[in-house]
Image (tube, grey):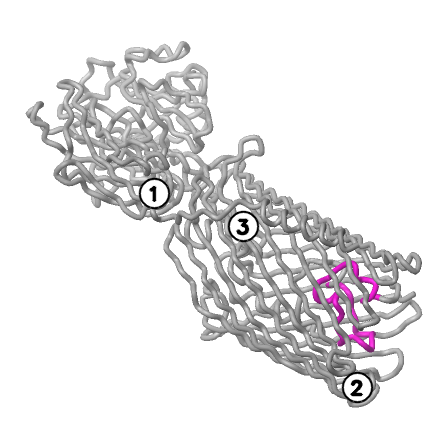
């Protein structure tokens, strides 16, 4: 998405997101750290979405997070990619540590802050000098297989202010850096700096049970790759799309520079008590545009390798019905995505590839409250994607449609007033992108979360695992992850 | 407030419409080139349009298969639906030139860099063929990149290959092989036995390829035990000397190393041996052939263009096992960018493409 190749979301990653954020089936790829790291299992109303969940408009942050809290969390994932693409790594370990705090300053102002540190270890990373080769239209590879360690501190700050009873304003800034180092020659070092600024405004029209918001976001990412060659100097290549390759000059130091920037405009609308009492309608529309300029060589004398522009239009419609005093509740959602990317040659003004993707996704979630201590949530989704990916240097067209179906079930229980337990499972079946070289994937997932109220706050433990199996092979990919968090409400 | 809201929308609308470059209308893979291969006779100052001349277009940007064409009776060749990239032309053909009443070996070596301008030209772009000249003893192959093996920094498997591209038997007596440094200083100098210029004890037959090994033994990655000659420095500590292979001996006073050349960039020359006073360089007119190679064209060229106008080996990395060799034995235009190609594996004692080892006995 956004100057990226066709959908490359790892199947297991998708599954884990499905499980971990089963209550939020949409909008999971939005880059807001203030959204992704909040466990919500302790909240009795956790199924109901608010506008902030769709668009992450900082103006609505306070409405979605009414209580102050602090959160400390630690997560560890282990991925074993027995079935992988050519430039994928064999195993991945992710460590994630974060601190998150929400504080109401006064009746008008709320601030949230975030500090996190992530480390990703890629083992037996074959050839690719990129963290994810399949994310980039202009990607560096060499001839070695080695281990790469990425370290990423990340900071975030959000300020939400009520201008008056009806008008809300919000501002958010995210900043992160990442350093990666490959442990074999070409000892490639990557440095990325990522910054995002978001400003939004919202109207709280409670009199007519409606909210309306708009925000803008600008983001900028600068990436530097430095592949240092020593005794046995591997050859470094640049990929243009998936098939065309340029052999880089065999210098002692190969530099690649990514300059990626863009902006987003997002509109949100929520109407409560729509037609029926307790039926809520949420609408969100976003337009995202980004450009990426890639050069190689020194900063003083860069050589152009390519330039690309990507745009995404996204619309989400949600109808949800979760009356507090009724056993049954449901949520229906529809997501439309339209991606259009293109990339041109660095030397000439000619198009070397373009990519058009349309995606329709329908989801349904049903809740049945058996009693005050036991909920059962189940649902499913269907997604169809229309691809039109073309490379012109080496004639290549990928225009097949992809589909995905998924279903899940989750049990949420509260045996007593201080403990809550979630147990869930899911199944997904989908057609992957052509570079997976298989017709279909089946993915099974399991997750459990146990949360207990202690004197320090809500202490939670989660366990995720998943298996994905490509058709016509006997190899299985699996992931196992554990998480620990402490959430203290004020 | 409404006005502020309108302003915000306006800012984003302007931002959206102005900040990215527009999508090119032209697709890659749509380039048409109309070329005409000609030979401009330097003696009679006459243009010859070369028919049935094979021409390859090799992309200088992408690692793709080359485009192959052949000229028509008027020397024209048209390539359609090419990738937009600078190209290097190549092609060799024996051509009967009526004015000479002889068959000449002509080659193509021009680069087509300004593709945008060429593509807009209404007329065919002329590509000039040139004559391969200077028969004699030439450096035919240099294996300098070495193989990666269990021993780190191993470089004893280097070799230099010579060939006699003339039609007469020539003699190696007293000739020298030198490694020339960045300031044109002689960094290594080894000499064949015999009397320079007049000696007749070490013949090299027409077309014969002579292998001169750094160390003439089986290096496992490559077997040089059957080399014709071996570099040897008697002052080298524990140096290897194959008693069955004759030696080129070191002339540099105080040098304690065997002949070795850089794994990335260097200049190798052969000279007739009439000037061996190496401290002030080697007389230009005694130099028979020279080849400069480099892995990086951004480095400053060190060789006099009268010896070598180009540079071979661009892209070769140390310990890759790759080698550079003339496109044909003795094919020499004094431009190693044109004369040499990169081989994925060395061919000690024989020419690439030949199935049989020709000269190793």
- What's the mark number on residue A104? none
- Would you name the residue on which mark 2 appears? A374
The answer to whether B307 appears left or right of A411 in the picture is left
- Would you name the residue on which mark 3 appears? A309
Chain for disc number 3: A
Q: Which residue is found at the position 77% from the left and 78% from the top?
A: A273
Residue B107, quarter of picture: top left
User: Closer to us: mark 2 or mark 3?
Assistant: 3
Position of the N terminus of chain B, as image quadrant, is bottom right
Residue B33 percent location from the top left of the image: 28, 40
Mark 2 and mark 3 lie on one chain; the one further toward the N terminus is 3
Residue B331 percent location from the top left of the image: 23, 30
The answer to whether B204 appears left or right of B232 in the picture is left
Q: Which residue is found at the position 25% from the left and 39% from the top?
A: B34
Residue A451 percent location from the top left of the image: 82, 74
- Would you name the residue on which mark 1 appears? B345
């Amino acid at each position: 998405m956004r100057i990226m190749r066709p959908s490359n979301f790892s199947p297991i990653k998708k599954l884990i997101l499905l499980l971990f954020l089963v209550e939020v089936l949409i909008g999971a790829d939005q880059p807001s750290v203030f959204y992704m790291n909040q466990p919500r299992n302790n909240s009795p109303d956790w199924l109901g979405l608010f506008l902030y969940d769709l668009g992450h408009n900082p103006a609505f942050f306070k409405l979605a997070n009414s209580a102050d809290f602090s959160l400390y969390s630690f997560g560890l994932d282990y991925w074993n990619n027995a079935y992988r693409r050519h430039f994928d790594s064999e195993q991945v370990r992710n460590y994630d540590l974060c601190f998150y705090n929400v504080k109401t300053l006064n009746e008008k102002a709320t601030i949230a802050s975030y500090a996190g540190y992530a480390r990703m270890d890629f083992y037996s990373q074959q050839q690719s000098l990129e963290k994810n080769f399949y994310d980039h239209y202009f990607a560096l590879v060499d001839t070695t297989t080695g281990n790469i360690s990425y370290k990423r501190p990340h900071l975030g700050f959000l300020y939400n202010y009520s201008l008056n009873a009806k008008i809300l304003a919000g501002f958010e800034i995210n900043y992160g850096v990442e350093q990666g180092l490959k442990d074999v020659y070409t000892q490639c070092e990557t440095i990325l700096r990522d910054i995002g600024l978001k400003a939004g405004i919202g109207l709280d029209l409670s009199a007519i049970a409606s909210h309306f918001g708009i925000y803008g976001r600008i983001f900028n990412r600068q990436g530097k790759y430095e592949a240092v060659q020593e005794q046995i100097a591997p050859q470094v290549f640049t990929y243009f799309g998936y098939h065309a390759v340029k052999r880089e000059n065999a210098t002692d130091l190969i530099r690649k520079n990514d300059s990626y920037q863009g902006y987003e405009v997002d509109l949100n609308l929520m109407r409560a008590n729509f037609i029926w009492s307790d039926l809520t309608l949420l609408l969100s529309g976003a337009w995202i545009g980004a450009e990426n300029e890639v050069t190689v060589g020194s900063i003083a004398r860069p050589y152009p390798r390519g330039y690309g522009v990507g745009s995404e239009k996204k619309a989400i419609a949600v109808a949800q019905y979760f009356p507090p005093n009724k056993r049954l509740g449901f949520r229906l959602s529809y997501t439309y995505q339209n991606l259009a990317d293109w990339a041109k040659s660095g030397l000439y003004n000619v198009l070397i590839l373009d990519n058009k993707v349309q995606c329709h996704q329908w989801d349904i979630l049903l809740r049945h409250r058996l009693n005050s201590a036991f909920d059962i949530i189940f649902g499913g989704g269907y997604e169809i994607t229309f691809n039109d990916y073309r490379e012109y240097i080496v004639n290549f067209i990928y225009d097949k449609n992809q589909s995905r179906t998924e279903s899940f079930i989750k049990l949420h229980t509260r045996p007593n007033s201080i403990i809550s337990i979630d147990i869930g499972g899911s199944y997904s079946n989908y057609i992957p992108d052509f570079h997976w070289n298989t017709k279909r994937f089946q993915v099974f997932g399991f997750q459990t979360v146990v949360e207990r109220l202690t004197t320090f706050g809500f202490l939670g433990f989660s366990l995720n695992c998943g298996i994905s199996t490509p058709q016509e092979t006997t190899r299985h990919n699996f992931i196992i992850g554990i998480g620990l968090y402490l959430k203290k409400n004020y | 407030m409404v006005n502020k809201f309108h302003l915000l929308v306006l800012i984003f609308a302007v931002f959206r419409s102005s900040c990215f470059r527009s999508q090119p209308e032209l697709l890659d893979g749509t380039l048409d080139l109309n070329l005409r291969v000609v030979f401009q006779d330097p003696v009679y100052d006459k243009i010859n349009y070369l028919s049935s001349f094979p021409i390859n277009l090799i992309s200088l940007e992408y690692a793709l298969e080359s485009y192959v064409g052949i000229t028509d009776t008027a020397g024209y060749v048209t390539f359609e639906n090419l990738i937009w990239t600078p190209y290097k032309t190549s092609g060799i053909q024996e051509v009967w030139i009526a004015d000479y009443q002889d068959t000449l070996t002509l080659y193509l070596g021009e680069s087509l860099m300004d593709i945008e301008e060429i593509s807009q030209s209404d007329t065919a772009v002329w590509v000039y063929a040139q004559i391969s000249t200077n028969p004699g003893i030439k450096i035919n192959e240099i294996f300098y990149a070495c193989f990666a093996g269990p021993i780190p920094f191993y470089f004893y498997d280097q070799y230099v290959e010579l060939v006699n591209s003339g039609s007469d038997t020539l003699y190696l007596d007293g000739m020298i092989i030198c490694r020339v440094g960045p300031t044109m200083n002689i960094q290594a100098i080894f000499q064949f036995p015999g009397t320079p210029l007049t000696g007749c004890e070490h013949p090299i037959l027409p077309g014969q390829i002579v292998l001169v090994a750094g160390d003439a033994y089986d290096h496992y990655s490559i077997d040089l035990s059957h080399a014709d000659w071996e570099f040897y420095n008697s002052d080298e500590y524990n140096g290897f000397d194959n008693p069955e292979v004759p030696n080129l001996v070191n002339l540099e006073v105080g040098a304690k190393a065997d002949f070795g050349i850089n794994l990335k960039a260097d200049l190798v020359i052969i000279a007739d041996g009439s000037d061996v006073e190496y401290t002030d360089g080697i007389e230009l007119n005694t130099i028979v052939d020279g080849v400069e190679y480099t892995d990086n064209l951004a480095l400053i060229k060190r060789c006099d263009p009268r010896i070598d106008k180009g540079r071979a080996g661009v892209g070769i990395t140390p310990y890759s096992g790759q080698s550079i060799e003339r496109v044909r034995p003795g094919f020499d235009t004094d431009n190693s960018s044109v004369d040499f190609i990169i081989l994925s594996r060395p061919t000690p004692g024989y020419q690439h493409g030949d199935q049989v080892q020709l000269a190793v006995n």
